[in-house]
Image: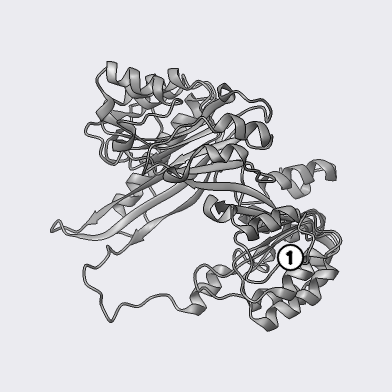
Amino acid sequence: MHLYSTPLPNEILRSITEYIAYIPELPDSCCSYSLSKHASPELLALSVVSSRLRQICLPLLFTHIEVRHDEDVNKLEKRLALYAKYTKTLSIDYNKETYYTLTEVGQQVLCQILPQLERLVDVGLGRCQNRTHLLESILTHPSVTSVLIHDLPDVSMCNHNLSKVILTRAYSSSALSPIYQTYFDQGMKLMCLGLKSDSVDNRLESQLFPGLKAIEIDMYSAPFSFSWLSPLASTHPGLVELRLLKIDHRYLAHNVPPFLLPLFEESQRQDFEDDLEITRLTLRRAQPIGQSSREWHVFELDLHIHDRMCQILSLVGSCFPSLEVLALDFENYVDGMFASYLSSELVDFLSLRVVYLKDIYHPLRIDEGIEMPPIVQLDPLDEMRAFAESTLLALAAHLVKEVRTLDSVHIDDSGDEYDEDGNAFDIWYIRKWIHALNSNCDVSGISGREPPPRILPDSNDETSTDDESGSNNDNSSSDGNNS
């Protein structure tokens, strides 16, 4: 029975439509740096099925919009009646492919449009230049409650009430400067504080960062103590996430954080500490109150595994029972493994929701009995990529079926395509999200082939034109959500 011909009430149809309305975002930290949501192909298709579904889809098509250059402003102006009625979030940034940004004229037109967006609540203001009037128009908009900025604007904000402003990230060297402190006093909040390990010391205990939710520490330099964490957490009740980034294996050999100590001690006892590398660690605390570092638990772990996968995963699962996100990199794995080996270990991770798998195709073996999806070739030369994609999707579907706690599996893999003489002529790549939907899987992402990089630059190399970049961009700009 077709969705548009069913006698279902509008409330149920609306719930179904909202569920499939947007392209799923990558699972991220508690600090979301983006307000953008891109309409899914399903939403666009539903919106032209019938007048009934069109009315249900319209608010979802126009709720979230992006403006990255003057063309987007022109599209916004042409359909202003619909945007004024439905738009709640607006993201303003530069075009990351062409580096175009709003001109002064484009900003002036946008300033004239903003007061008519009467339902606007959240605004993301990216790296636009010369935005004095634009910033003022946003900060004084009566319905806007939050303004997300990625860096301080190139104009002073000293004359404004900054209670709506949230700075997504700043390093401590900047956050402790007088201008930041002035803005904090005027109400600005800081979402994430970045630290380098050589700048971490007990002076952090006495600092105040309004609105702080997360701390990121680059772990590649000097060792440091975590004694500052409990006092800082006690004065920042919203602080719920601590990320340790760029972890160097040589660094950990002599400076193991207390949160990793059980894993390192047991891996040394079992003599496989050289078979794994931890490159990233995220800690969370379930309750935003209290002073004990015991509140913190390992939420996310990134591992490079070289050998003995089953023993390593068994140990990780026992050390970190609250682990929700696990990233496994098999680029240097020395042996083969069956899909069932991986699923049998992951099934013991009782809190696991998301698994990232990188470069697992070459060591992977699919067990008999695991169903392989159809092999779909883009062209006669696409054999390797097509077979790899079928194999990897079979693995992902198997994991989602066997590991019942999983919400999604992310696949990131690549390899060479060879001609009859054994020469590599293309590099295939597969980057897919597989989402668990009851007993089924929803697949999104990209795959394809591209020429291998040239060793020497070629003056005849043709790159995409600005027009091509712009046309690709329309899929996620203001008009792209409303095709």
Residue 405 in percent (x, y) is at: 55, 26
Q: How is the image coloured?
A: one colour
- Figure check: 447 above or below 252: below
Along the viewing direction, whichever of 75 and 232 lies nearer the viewer:
232
Circle 1 crowding by C-alpha within 10 Å: few under 14, some 14–19, many from 20: few
Along the viewing direction, whichever of 187 and 145 lies nearer the viewer:
187
Quadrant location of the C terminus in the rendered image: bottom right
Quick check: can you spot residue 25? no
Q: What residue is drawn where x is 54% and y is 33%?
A: 228
Q: What residue is drawn where x is 80% and y is 53%?
A: 56
Q: What residue is drawn where x is 63% and y is 25%?
A: 291
Along the viewing direction, whichever of 97 and 274 lies nearer the viewer:
274
Residue 336 in percent (x, y) is at: 25, 31
Residue 448 position by quadrant: bottom left
Quick check: can you spot residue 262? yes
Answer left or right for 172 relative to 362. Answer: right
Number of marks in picture: 1
Along the viewing direction, whichever of 20 and 86 lies nearer the viewer:
86
Residue 478 position by quadrant: bottom right
Quadrant location of the N terminus in the rendered image: top right
Label 1 sits on residue? 158
**Dot 1 lies on which element?**
loop
Residue 42 in percent (x, y) is at: 64, 53
Residue 154 in percent (x, y) is at: 62, 71
Answer left or right for 23 relative to 275. Answer: right
Type of the residue with mark 1: Cys
Residue 179 position by quadrant: bottom right
Answer left or right for 449 relative to 435. Answer: left
